[in-house]
Image: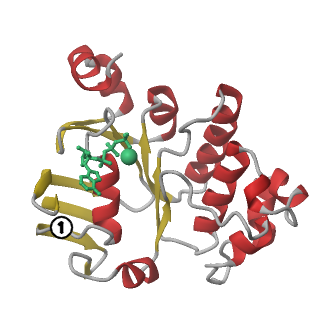
Amino acid sequence: MLQLTDVETYYGESHVLHGVSLRLEPGEAVGLLGRNGAGKSTVIRTIVGFTPPRSGSIRFFDHELAGLPSYKIARLGIGLVPQGRRIFPDLTVRENLTLAARDQAGGWTLGRVMDHFPRLRERQSQLAGTLSGGELQMVAIGRALMTNPRLLLMDEPSEGLAPMIVREIGAIIAELKAEKLSFVLVEQNLSLALDSVDRAYVMNKGAIVFEGTPGELLADEAVHRQYLGV
Ligand SMILES: Nc1ncnc2c1ncn2[C@@H]1O[C@H](COP(=O)(O)OP(=O)(O)OP(=O)(O)O)[C@@H](O)[C@H]1O
Ligand SMILES: [Mg+2]
């Protein structure tokens, strides 16, 4: 459903992505790993059109995304949970969730999102600016689900959260996987990533340096040492 081929992305004259190719099949969960500055967010930003590729192709079903404006890419059914969450602090939880909602028969509704996040139901009238980091992350995921995406892109959902809250987010991601939602999960938390995906890519210096199953990645000590710092 998603296929990047030889993608090259720049910030101004700074060449950041070098020939990135990756794919995702319907219902698949794919991880994107790598150290700080490896280029993970730039891949996400390239897919959603925030920093379009200078060359290469991004196919999503039968659409070419390269060159399309972000709002059109979102409308094709790509949901984003951005790094840093980007929630509106002066709106309530409920307002943040419903802001970008798009109805779909049998899809995600406010009620269904709150079934997955009981804490958000309790806090639905609270201003988002007063939420904890973990709760904000739940709003960010819930908001993206409310657009009823065919593909969900999550950029470091566990970042900055306490271990107990990371486990909670991990449980939610496992539920999404069980429901066969297609997603790309960017993570620096290796165990969370490997528990959550069917296949993983590792990036270094703007290029893909490994692709394989969680089992294959766990078995490859050189990749761990060189690119994941464990
Ligand atoms: N707006 C920008 N202008 C110029 N360079 C940028 C910009 N954003 C990112 N970069 C550079 O691009 C490279 C890749 O950054 P990117 O944010 O994609 O990394 P990342 O893998 O997501 O890292 P992290 O795990 O820290 O979020 C880095 O060298 C970074 O400094
Ligand atoms: Mg990033």
Q: Is residue 126 left or right of residue 76?
A: right
Q: Nearer the viewer, residue 163 or 25?
A: 163
x and y percent of residue 123 in the render? 86, 58
Q: How crowded is mark 1: few (under 14 residues within 10 Å), some or many (20 or more)?
A: many
Q: What residue type is labelled 1?
A: Pro
* Quadrant of residue 202 within the rendered picture: top left
* Quadrant of residue 146 within the rendered picture: bottom right
Q: How many labels does the image show?
A: 1
Q: In which quarter of the image is the N terminus?
A: bottom left
Q: Mark 1 points at which residue?
A: 53
Q: Which residue is drawn at 60% across and 43% down?
A: 174
Q: Nearer the viewer, residue 22 or 229?
A: 229
Q: Which residue is drawn at 48% across and 57% down?
A: 82
Q: Is residue 118 left or right of residue 166?
A: right
Tell me if residue 24 can be seen.
no
Q: Nearer the viewer, residue 23 or 128?
A: 128
Render colour scheme: secondary structure
x and y percent of residue 2 in the render? 30, 65
Q: Residue at x 46, y 76 (%)?
A: 77
- Relative to residue 207, is residue 21 depicted above or below? below
Q: In this view, does 132 lie to the left or right of 229?
A: right
Q: Which residue is drawn at 47% across and 30% down?
A: 189
Q: Nearer the viewer, residue 227 or 218?
A: 227
x and y percent of residue 208 in the render? 18, 42
- Relative to residue 33, is residue 230 depicted above or below? above
Q: In which quarter of the image is the C terminus?
A: top left
Q: Is residue 180 left or right of residue 126?
A: left
